[in-house]
Amino acid sequence: MRVVTLILAILLLLLQYPLWLGKGGWLKVWDLNRQVESQQQANQQTQARNALLDAEVRDLKQGTEAIEERARSELGMVKRDEMFFQIIESPPRSSVSAVTEAEPASR
């Protein structure tokens, strides 16, 4: 009886090996599913980027407003007979220098 049980256990293990570790086993399927999910995420990001680029191309082809906006922001261009004012703010004075200027030395 022990021999029959041992033979059946070995047969069971031999049948389980391809299921878990074989060419189409569960581990391989799990790994492929993980790869498919990561590729789907990459595809979604690419589709979103492509949609933004498509909208930008359509804007540039149809109207001049997008071209004008780019020329102004990226190239600093100004229309003819248009005045451009650039305001440069001075950095705030540090609190240490403000205190020393406000309080005269007691010596």
Image (cartoon, helix red, strand yellow):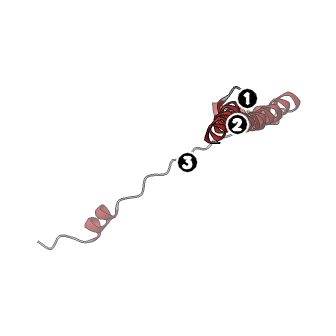
How far is the residue under mark 1 from the one under mark 3?
Answer: 68 Å
> In the structure shown, which secondary structural element does the residue marked by tag 1 occupy?
loop
Residue appearing at x 70%, y 25% in the figure:
23
Q: Indicate the position of residue 72 as horizontal and vertical percent values.
A: 69, 35
State the residue lying farthest toward the bottom. 106
Left/right of residue 106 with respect to residue 63 in the rendered view:
left
Q: Nearer the viewer, residue 52 or 80?
A: 52
Q: Amino acid at mark 3?
A: Ile
The label number, if any, that marks residue 104 in the structure image: none
Q: Nearer the viewer, residue 23 or 66?
A: 23
> In the structure shown, which secondary structural element does the residue marked by tag 2 occupy?
helix
**Residue density around tag 2, few if under 14, some if 14–19, many if 20 or more, within 10 Å:** some
The label number, if any, that marks residue 24 in the structure image: 1
The label number, if any, that marks residue 87 in the structure image: 3
Q: Nearer the viewer, mark 3 or mark 2?
A: 2
Q: Earlier in the sequence, mark 1 or mark 3?
A: 1
State the residue lying farthest toward the right. 62
Determine which quarter of the picture holds residue 93: bottom left
Q: Indicate the position of residue 24 as horizontal and vertical percent values.
A: 73, 29
Does 107 appear above or below 61?
Answer: below
Residue appearing at x 68%, y 33% in the figure:
11
Q: Indicate the position of residue 88 as horizontal and vertical percent values.
A: 51, 47
Residue carrying label 2? 26
Left/right of residue 75 with respect to residue 56 in the rendered view:
left
